[in-house]
Amino acid sequence: MRTRLLLLLAALGSVPGRVRVAVRLRPRNAEELAADADFADCVELQPELKRLKLRKNNWDSDTYEFDEVLTEFASQKRVYEVVAKPVVESVLDGYNGTVMAYGQTGTGKTFTLGRLGEQDTADRGIMVRSMEDILAEISPETDSVSVSYLQLYMEALQDLLNPANDNIPIVEDPKIGDVSLPRATLVEIRDQQSFVELLRIGETHRIAANTKLNTESSRSHAILMVHVKRSFMGGDNIYSNENGDISHLAKPLKPLVRKSKLVVVDLAGSERIHKSGSEGHMLEEAKSINLSLSALGKCINALAENSAHVPIRDSKLTRLLRDSFGGTARTSLIVTIGPSPRHRGETTSTILFGQRAMKVENMLKIKEEFDYKSLSRRLEVQLDKLIAENERQQKAFEDEVERINIEAENRVSEVERSFADALEKERLKCQMDYMESVKQLEEKLVLNQQQRDFDVFTDSNCIGQAGGSVEVLKLHKILENEAHQKKKLEEEIIILRSQLLQLTFEADQMKRYLDGGGSGNAYTGLDSSMSPFRHPQLKDAVNGQKASIATLFEQVGLQKILALLESDDANVRIHAVKVVANLAAEEANQKKIVEAGGLTSLLVLLRSFEDETVRRVAAGAIANLAMNEANQELIMAEGGISLLSMTAADAEDPQTLRMVAGAIANLCGNDKLRMKLKSEGGIKALLGIVRCGHPDVLSQVARGIANFAKCESRASTQGTNSSRSLLIEDGALPWIVQNANDEAAPIRRHIELALCHLAQHEVNAKDMISGGALWELVRISRDCSREDIRSLARRTLISSPTFRSELRRLRIEY
Ligand code: ADP
Ligand code: MG
């Protein structure tokens, strides 16, 4: 039960413990053997009873009990084991511990504590044996031991490891009451040999110092301080379960350090204090002899009597031992006595001192600290490991991404290659089929011709014959059929030719795309900024096709191609519209197409077909035709704007929207169409297209708006327009302002121009200010990368009174 209580208290950090006191009797020395030969010893020891009888006279004695009674035969080993070993063990467990020797000079204090035992190992004293046990117990990797060795004489603390260092101050931690000597030399001990050497050096310095001060070592205290620091992993919560067992809570262990200290004090000879006391000397005299020792006695008395005031602060020694004696440490006191009856007084006094000390209760406290340093070290190591691991994973991830990329690229190029091959094969096949068909048709044609010649010949032979008219009618019928057949075959030839042309064109595009890595457009025509579907890089490809198109014109005839636009066969229609779109890309063909009624057919396609491909290609063709001013008027006259608006409203594909926006944008550039465009919903249609958001589409919208604004400003300058901008009327301003600083350069450029044009007409100024366009104009005049637009914006701003007054109002310097 008591063990459990102690364990529990130990777990809580403190244990109460009385100062353990042993008494040791020195054997008679030579002088005593001679001088006291006829006298009995003044003490009689009963070690088995742990009792000591102090003879008062021949017939009377007092009996005292001690924790240990050590006779003159007690070995140094036994003395160490009963007096110091429990203290050393306690120090290794993290408590402070103190071993002190008290007694008259010559009774064996130094013998007990300080013997080095170099001649005879059995002689080794407590200091040497303690260090042996400590060094054997600790682990050199995680723990450390260091010592200071000091002498206290006449209230001055002197460093025995560095005698020049005297008058060392004692520093007390006011919070935990810990005592330290920061200026004392602290030597780390790694092996027993160096410790013994250190003790020897200390002893030499002690003798030298005492010689110098003309004093005896018996008048000074020698203090050895052993600091033990141990690291371990531990939890901080302990509880006792139903069975009373102590268990650690399942908390993660953390690194802790336990710091403890063992203080071994070889006190000055007690005879002086005794003398001063027994002979009734004044306290002051006692003080002058050995203040520290008398203060120790007073403290022990006060502690033994549980007195409210313990005069710890009266001396250096008591201050130094405040956390050791009567404090929070495990303490053993060995009182040494001599046998001689001549010193009965001294001996009695020593025994009484020991008896009083036995009543002193100590409270043990474990000194445990959280080892932040080692935790931080461990965390750092862990962190480094994690960083390295993270780096490895990152690298693996990047490698994997790269591998997948390469694989994907390989696959894409493989697919592209096989596609190109397939296309080429298809093209060759078509060519073969075509040639075969032409051959067959020609053969048929020859046969028909022969047949007809023959028929004509027979007919003329039959004239006049009976029933001849019936034959003629029959022959006419056959002829008609043949003619019909021929027409159909010719149509087929046209289709096949246009298909071949288309395929050749597409194959060529693909080849160029694969060779050049660029993107192609099947409806590419001339290089012109007015066309929404042209690509400068493809000019060569286009030129390459000119010959084919010319051939097609010659071989087939435009009328026939246009007639195919109305074919019942959807496939034929698609091919035909593609061919027409390609033809319309050539400026030279545009007029011809329009004259042949191609524009009307294309507009019809916009109206009548659900298929978005057809509408997209048709819109593209119309956009190309809309590059020409005369055609623009024609498109408007034929209701083109509403058809384009309808197409825009239905279209999903950005390409279709781009074509439609391109066509309207071209129409917007025509001064004559301005009012009609507005009234027929052209501007609204253009603004509706912005829903798509594709930059190519937006660029066409912006171009249309810029074109329109330009026409308006031109009309204003010429005095033919005095009203507010139709663009503003139709609500284009918010989109313009919103996209004025678009990151796509073409969009930005068109809008910047549009803003400059709008700003030229004073009647628009108010709307522009309220719509936030003024800021954009200021920005354009300052930041636009194109010098001409910048200065246009600046000129516009300066020339408008409304803008100027607004800028003044806003205090913008202009
Ligand atoms: P103190 O330090 O108390 O003044 P010392 O330790 O110097 O006394 O002892 C005085 C003398 O007595 C020394 O010569 C020492 O060797 C001897 N002595 C002391 N104790 C014993 C003992 N237990 N056995 C043998 N000799 C002893
Ligand atoms: Mg001594």
Image: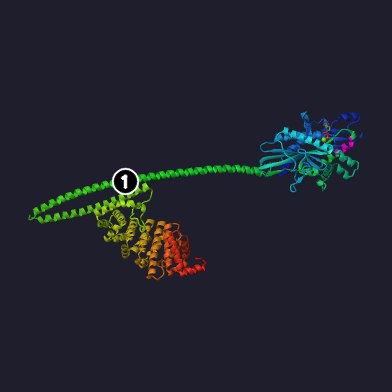
Which of the two residues, 580 or 198, is positioned nearer the viewer here?
A: 198
Which of the two residues, 326 or 209, is positioned nearer the viewer here?
A: 209
Examine the residues drawn in magenta and state their main secondary structure. helix
193, above or below 439, in the image? above
Rendering coords of residue 203 (x, y %): 79, 35
Rendering coords of residue 490 (x, y %): 23, 53
Callout 1: 10 Å neighbours few (<14), some, many (20+)?
A: some
- Is residue 349 on the magenta stretch? yes
Residue at 49% across, 44% down: 398
Which of the two residues, 786 or 638, is positioned nearer the viewer here?
A: 786
Rendering coords of residue 379 (x, y %): 61, 43
Can residue 529 be seen here? The reply is yes
446, above or below 606, in the image? above
704, above or below 400, in the image? below
Q: Which residues are magenta?
A: 343-351
Q: Which residue is mark 1?
A: 424
Q: Quadrant of residue 226?
A: top right
Can residue 734 be seen here? The reply is no
Which of the two residues, 353 or 197, is positioned nearer the viewer here?
A: 197
- Label 1 sits on a secondary structure element that is helix
Where's ligand 1: which quadrant?
top right
Some atom of ligand 2 lies within 8 Å of the CB belonging to the residue at label 1: no
- Is residue 523 on the magenta stretch? no
